[in-house]
Amino acid sequence: MASRVFRSSLGLASRLRPAASFVPCQTRAFAASSRNMSAPFYSFEPEGPTVKTDIPGPRAKAAIAELDQVFDTRSLNMLVDYQKSSGNYIADPDGNVLLDVYAQIASIPIGYNNPTLLKAARSDDMINGLINRPALGNFPPEDWASVLKTGILKVAPKGLDQVFTAMAGSDANETAYKAAFMWRRQQDRGGHHVEFTEEELASSMRNEAPGASQSLSILSFKTGFHGRLFGSLSTTRSKPIHKLDIPAFDWPQATFPLLKYPLEEHAAENAAAEQAALQEVEHLLTTYRVPPCAVIVEPIQSEGGDNHASAAFFRGLREVTRKHNVLLIVDEVQTGVGATGRFWAHEHWDLPHPPDMVTFSKKAQTAGYYFGNPELRPNKPYRQFNTWMGDPARALLFRAIIQEIERLDLVANTARVGDYLYGKLEALAKQYPGQFDNLRGKGMGTFIAFDNPRRDEFLLRAKKFGVNIGGSGQSAVRLRPMLIFQEKHADLLVEALEKIVKSF
Ligand SMILES: Cc1ncc(COP(=O)(O)O)c(C=O)c1O
């Protein structure tokens, strides 16, 4: 199996060097073939994967051994040649090129070496942002308002017109939690402008109440994932390995309604599970020994097994949080920026009132949380602050990503290709019973997953058949293609998936 060549070799991609070799297609002008329904977005991608050696091959093995002397390689998935990677394809040092539907843990939005991003990276604005990195809270650049309005805030979820910028997903969640705690304690004090007492000031320095609140919590869901920093880790419930040995807060967890598939055959049972979960949330909000001031939830539990819930469940969650004056934080770190066929996954829910905060990172390449209520801005400066508070260079990159998403209508593309891919996977699931179990993500763009009884081996074999795929939870194969994933890529993926299950 070591040397299997698909369709074409790396060819163009191996010759890729910055600038002149990238020719963005004038996409819509291309005639669609009978097989592939849409014209290619870019001309620089290879026609398909190439597998020349085992992965890792000899060059990668040598480089990994060298790396291991100075850096822990036990979590290494594959060693990458980023210069030779292009679009949907990831290359390695041995000349293997894989169709990448894992995309750096769902964080590459518009492909490796995207020409539009290369152009943005070479701009004077980007160079200025990179080499004169500002401490944003103290010394924001003169055009920071404009960078935000034309970028991060241009795609702000409905009803949320402000942003706190951060460095990564965990950081975005933690700062959102801090905003929630400060908001609630100011309410308890009697309003935004009420001063702290001497006792609060002094006790905070001893890590004691009343200054350091011991009586507020964040409610999260079982099997949810919200990051690995101290505060965010207390809300993460996906795997013990993330949490072992780290001091944790006494915060409550509610059951996430683990739905049964196919949904049509379990409608009543699933609705009952969702109702029970909402009741449990309400019970915890009203009785937990450390009262929650916020609930955090992922639109799709992305690390914990690709667990979905219905729009009705999330509307119920919005209702119950409002009823108890508890904030709703929607963690869109993995679901955001187009992958579900809407820019934000929570747009699928048709909420009568927006979430209080929406956190983002990954495909945005920058991070932070959106909010609307001015009282979520702390009542004093420096309560929510750090040196960088985000990064203008990354904000500029997100702006360029947004422009490209708009230019190529990539959210609509993802919705359409997702439906196409889902249809093909449904057919595969029928053909190979037990191999594509609990297929989920219908109508959710390319955010699709299924369970396989030999999941880990499945993911390993995928590379031999030319695709790089990730897993989530105990047994899920999760698909996280980029937004430039098209029908022809879906065809290649489905072919490879069939070969994998046939090889068992
Ligand atoms: C839903 C969700 N929230 C938060 C995080 C943490 O983000 P980061 O790893 O950037 O800190 C992740 C990362 O996978 C995530 O999937």
Image (cartoon, rainbow, N blue to C red):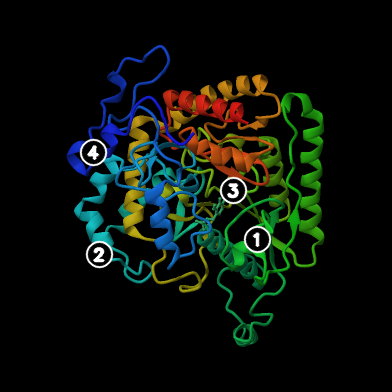
Q: CA distance from mark 4 to mark 3?
A: 47 Å
Q: Nearer the viewer, residue 325 or 21?
A: 21
- Amino acid on which the number 2 mark rests in the picture: Ile
Answer whether residue 346 is visible to the viewer in this image: no
Residue for badge 4: 15
Instruction: Determine the residue positioned at 72% across, 52% down.
Output: 222
Residue for badge 3: 355
Ligand 1 has an atom within 8 Å of the beta carbon of the residue at disc 3: no
Above or below, 146 relative to 32: below
Above or below, 394 relative to 17: below
Ligand 1 has an atom within 8 Å of the beta carbon of the residue at disc 2: no
* Mark closest to the chain's N terminus, 3 or 2: 2
Q: Is the C-beta separation of discs 3 and 1 under 8 Å? A: no
- Amino acid on which the number 1 mark rests in the picture: Ile
Which element type, helix, strand or loop, lies under badge 2? helix
Residue for badge 2: 131
Q: CA distance from mark 3 to mark 2?
A: 36 Å
Q: CA distance from mark 4 to mark 1?
A: 41 Å
Where on the picture, by quarter, is residue 32?
Answer: top left
* Mark closest to the chain's N terminus, 4 or 1: 4
Instruction: Determine the residue positioned at 41% across, 39% down.
Output: 53
Q: Is residue 407 left or right of residue 372?
A: left
